[in-house]
């Protein structure tokens, strides 16, 4: 079986390259997806994930992350966690628990501490300056406080047919303390079943979670659609539904991968993604 991997936004390029190295050498999908997301979490200049992520309205970086295993449907997630270096690794660890698999705030931090995860002040000087500027802009120019958010969401298939998915984000810039988006929510921010395929989402969490978008894309694949058709249909249909019911729809994008390594994307905005796959013994990468 050929390996394949896809992730949201240009920011995951270095992570996908690191994951591809693992997959090329016969490594496990769970290790590859975790490595891809950790690479993004560690990079200080990406403003919406991990270290350097933009803070909430109290100038605190609160992060959401999840990990899902497509063989067992095990899921682990953290919401609103602060001051830990790699939320995705904490989520992966939680996915091995039988109970208490989704922890938020101080409970998530306590678990991470007890299990030896590395602490780190995730607020960079740069993110703080951007926050200060936004505070001024909100009062001077009446600017929307919530502009500026993205999630790294990755779906991966390894050479043994094992599929996984993972997400990580600092959520909406200037969000209320305690706000949790779609990214750690199973079925909304991510979903994967090794017998079918997986999907991961980015965009306005408040809207994505209304449509359980990632689950919907996997369901469409299960019913016979290829990943491109499924991603497009899930996003477009739900976006239309929201417009009809509520007059507007927030930004939503999906990356999808099936268990044959075929991939697709759907979006109602401008969106970039990165994918890597084994092809005739060589790695191929694409992005738009
Ligand atoms: N979905 C994320 C959230 O709402 C943000 C994003 O992906 O743009 O927290």
Image (spheres, rainbow, N blue to C red):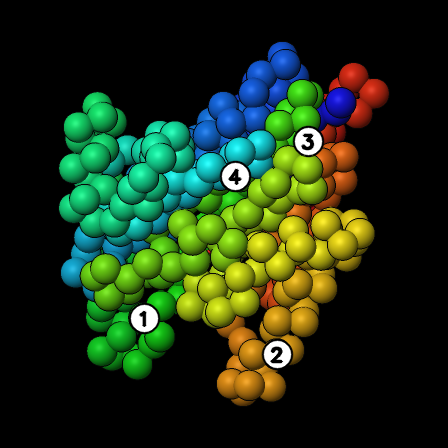
Tell which tag, 3 or 1, sits nearer the viewer: 3
Give left or right: position of 229 versus 141.
Answer: right
Q: State which tag comes first along the sequence, 3 or 4.
A: 3
Q: State which tag comes first along the sequence, 1 or 2.
A: 1
Judged from the image, the secondary structure of the residue bearing numbered disc 2 is: helix
Mark seen at residue 4: 3
Mark 1 surroundings: few (<14), some (14-19) or many (≥20) residues within 10 A? some
Q: Give the CA distance from mark 3 to mark 4.
A: 19 Å
- Residue furthest to the right in view is 280
Mark seen at residue 241: 2
Q: Is mark 3 within 8 Å of ligand 1?
A: no
Judged from the image, the secondary structure of the residue bearing numbered disc 4 is: loop
Judged from the image, the secondary structure of the residue bearing numbered disc 3 is: strand
Residue that badge 4 annotates: 73
Tell which tag, 1 or 4, sits nearer the viewer: 4
Mark 2 surroundings: few (<14), some (14-19) or many (≥20) residues within 10 A? some
- Whole-percent x, y for residue 226 in the image: 79, 50
Residue that badge 1 annotates: 145
């Amino acid at each position: 079986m050929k390996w394949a991997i896809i992730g949201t936004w240009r920011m995951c390029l270095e992570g996908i390259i690191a994951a591809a190295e693992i997959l090329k050498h016969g490594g496990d999908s769970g290790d590859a997806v975790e490595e891809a997301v950790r690479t993004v979490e560690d990079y200080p200049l990406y403003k919406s994930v991990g270290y350097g992520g933009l803070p909430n309205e109290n100038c605190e970086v609160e992060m959401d992350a999840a990990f899902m295993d497509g063989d067992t449907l095990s899921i682990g997630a953290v919401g609103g966690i602060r001051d830990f270096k790699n939320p995705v690794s904490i989520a992966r660890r939680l996915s091995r628990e039988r109970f208490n698999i989704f922890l938020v705030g101080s409970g998530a931090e306590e678990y991470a501490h007890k299990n030896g995860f590395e602490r780190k002040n995730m607020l960079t000087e740069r993110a703080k300056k951007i926050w200060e500027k936004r505070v001024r802009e909100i009062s001077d120019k009446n600017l929307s406080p919530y502009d500026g958010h993205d999630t790294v969401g990755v779906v991966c298939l390894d050479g043994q047919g094992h599929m996984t998915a993972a997400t990580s984000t600092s959520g909406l810039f200037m969000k209320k303390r305690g706000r949790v988006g779609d990214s750690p929510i199973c079925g909304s921010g991510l979903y994967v079943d090794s017998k079918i395929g997986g999907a991961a989402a980015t965009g306005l969490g408040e809207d994505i979670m209304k449509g359980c978008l990632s689950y919907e894309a996997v369901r469409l694949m299960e019913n016979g659609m290829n990943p491109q058709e499924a991603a497009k249909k899930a996003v477009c249909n739900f976006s239309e539904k929201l417009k009809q019911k509520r007059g507007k729809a927030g930004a939503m994008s999906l990356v999808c991968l099936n268990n044959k390594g075929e991939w697709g994307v759907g979006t109602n905005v401008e969106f970039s993604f990165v994918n890597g796959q084994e092809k005739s013994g060589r790695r191929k990468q694409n992005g738009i």
